[in-house]
Amino acid sequence: APRIKQTAKYLWIIYLGLIFLMTITLYIEGIIFDIDKLNLFHSLCHAFGTIGTAGFSTYNNSIATFDSSIITWTFILFMFLSATNFTLHFIFLTKGSFKYFKNSEFKTYIKIILFIGLFFFIGISNLDLTNHISNQNFTLYDKLESAFFYATSFVTTTGFTQSNYLDWNNSSLIIIFILLFLGGCAGSTTGGIKLIRTLLIFKYLKSTIKKIIHPNGVYPIRIGNKEVSTDIIQSVLGFYFIYIFIFILLSLIISLTSNTDLVSSLAVSASTIGNVGPGLGIIGPLGNWSDFTDLTKWILSFCMLLGRLEIFTVIILFSKTYWKR
């Protein structure tokens, strides 16, 4: 929009509109399926937690509390919409133009969720899994539902939990660890690095390899039909480097201040700056953050803000040159 005020207004309309739509949907589903724990208050709280990709639930067992396949798929849908670039929602609502599949980041976003969902499902299809709420064995459909739920929950950095994914095979847990970094689309409420940056890095690597093979060739890097400038590429590379550096440093600080194991230290660090919530080790779906020391909690709190403000914003605020006239 031509004015910042208009842009803010449209963002608020889309954000609050999605919250309202999800609240009403959950509330109606709670009535239809006679789910007492999904009244208007809890519907509203879960809508805020979903559209803000925050993952907070009013129940200790998160989404598993509702024990409903329809409710689970409702969360999957709205988590997916929340991590989609709000610009695409804006274009669709104001101009009626469905340009989602013309956006390279959105197409990558869908492919990643589908691929990871299928990867999870294949990995756990032969495992003997038990629902930690009902103590019943998972059916093949339950495993499919859980696979796509967690694929969406981690890619969007929402962090809702539905079953104990720590019982899954190691390859799935490795993918979950990677997803703690990835993030959803730019221009959404999601945390993490953001898909557009990762997409740009892969395009840069592809261009570099071509340049090594054919030194005289010209291989511009494009996102959609637009060529990306060298300054932007350097900025993204710098962001990646700083992000990984902070992840390593935070992992060391966590291990020193709270005496956690290796997996937990790495997962807590990645989950914190990626604003995901759950992770591996002591912060798995059945765990929480209460065992950390007060010092560790203060450090983690700062790093949560650091990750949410996209690092550079905070670094600039602490830069001496920023405050000089």
Image (cartoon, rainbow, N blue to C red):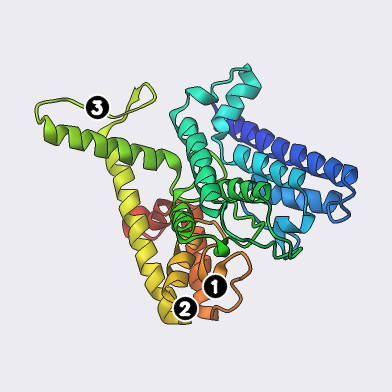
Q: Residues at badges 3 and 1 in contact (C-beta under 8 Å)?
A: no
The numbered mark, 1 or 2, whose residue comes first in the sequence reads 2
Residue 280 x/y as whole percent: 51, 65
Q: Mark 3 — residue?
A: 220
Q: Which quarter of the figure is the N terminus placed in?
A: top right
Label 1 neighbourhood size at 10 Å, few (<14), some (14-19), many (20+)?
Answer: many
Q: Residues at badges 2 and 3 in contact (C-beta under 8 Å)?
A: no
Q: Mark 2 — residue?
A: 260
Say what secondary structure mark 1 lies in. Answer: helix
Mark pair 1, 2: CA separation: 8 Å
Q: Nearer the viewer, residue 204 or 11?
A: 204
Q: Is residue 204 left or right of residue 35?
A: left
**Residue sitting at the far front:** 126
Q: Which mark is residue 70?
A: none
Quadrant housing residue 174:
bottom left
* In the depicted structure, whether residue 280 falls above or below residue 208: below
**Mark 2 or mark 3, which is nearer to you?**
2
The numbered mark, 3 or 1, whose residue comes first in the sequence reads 3
Q: Mark 1 — residue?
A: 282
Residue 26 x/y as whole percent: 80, 44
Circle 2: residue type = Thr
- Residue 231 visible here: no
Q: Residues at badges 1 and 2 in contact (C-beta under 8 Å)?
A: yes
* In the depicted structure, whether residue 325 falls above or below residue 294: above
Circle 3: residue type = Pro
Mark pair 3, 1: CA separation: 45 Å
Circle 1: residue type = Ile
Q: Who's the residue at 47% across and 51% down the image? A: 192
Residue 73 x/y as whole percent: 70, 42
